[in-house]
Amino acid sequence: MAAEGEYESILCVKPDVNVYRIPPRASNRAYRAADWKLDSPDWSGRMRVTAKGQMAFVKLEDKVSGELFAQAPINEYPGVSVETVSDSSRYFVLRIQDESGRSAFIGVGFEDRGDAFDFNVALQDHFKWVKQENEISKNAHLGDSGPKLDLGFKEGQTITLNIGQGRKKDKPRPQSSGGFGLLPPPPGGKIAPPPLSGSSNHNIVPQTGDMATGCLLELDSSNSNTVVQSNASSDLWGDFSAPASSVPPSSRPENVGNWIKF
């Protein structure tokens, strides 16, 4: 039963419910709503489902005055206090009880199938909560009475901590033969071969004395041409006033005198 200090909460209210007298059950088979006089209910009113503590109560009250017609205390669901019928989901069998403790079985039914569903779910949710509360209380009781885990150090027990010893030492980088600290090539990479000595950006053109004179006229050209003369001791950048001294007499062209003097 509910304790005195607990408050009463309302789980569900349905304004239209019918009550039927049902014949006594002769065997263990389930109740059938077809055996009742569904066209002429014995009472009509309002149903209010309340909860006080772990107990639930189905109260049948008058629609206008709210006077209590019958009450069914429920301590478990599904159970003996509330039973479903085998041929419909809108009808139930309640075991009502008066203040003196006398009980009787009556049939109740809803006009709307949704009202019957709400009544069923309200009772299921309440007793699901009751089950969870009982499990929490049971686990708390077992936790207090059970052995406690001792995580403290025993007498003479020590621990060792290795801090900073797991670091890897940096390996020295290999150096080239010239002493420069060059980075090693990437793994799996290929090193491009050095450029050939013949593929230079500068064009080396070996020239003789006839062509050496013409090179002096192309000093302002955009291409950088290196002139290699047959005579290594001659200087092309000498005195412009007397270029004849830097050119052998045998290879001097006939028209050289036309441009020597400006």
Image (spheres, rainbow, N blue to C red):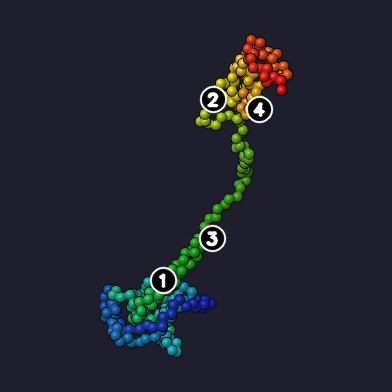
Q: Nearer the viewer, mark 2 or mark 4?
A: 4
Going from the N terminus, do you reach mark 3 or mark 2 first? 3
Q: CA distance from mark 2 to mark 1?
A: 84 Å
Q: Secondary structure at mark 3?
A: helix
Q: Is residue 87 above or below residue 39?
A: above
Q: Which mark is residue 193?
A: 2
| Tag nearer the camera, 3 or 4 | 4
**Quadrant holding the C terminus:** top right
Q: Say whether residue 116 is left or right of residue 138.
A: left
**Reading the chain from its start, which is encountered first: label 3 or label 4?**
3
| Residue beneath disc 3 | 144
- Looking at the image, which residue sits at the far bottom? 65
Residue in the foreground of this view, choosing between 29 and 111: 111
> Distance from label 2 to label 4 (Cα)?
35 Å
Q: Which residue is mark 1?
A: 124
| Residue at 47% from the left image edge and 64% from the top image edge | 135
Of tags 1 and 3, which is closer to the observer?
Answer: 1
Between 205 and 8, the one lying in front of the other is: 205
Foreground residue among 34 and 210 = 210
Mark sitting earlier along the chain (1/4) = 1
Q: Earlier in the sequence, mark 1 or mark 3?
A: 1
Above-or-below relation of 211 to 185: above
Q: Left of 21 or right of it: where is 220?
A: right
Measured as percent of width and height from the top left, residue 219 is found at 66, 25
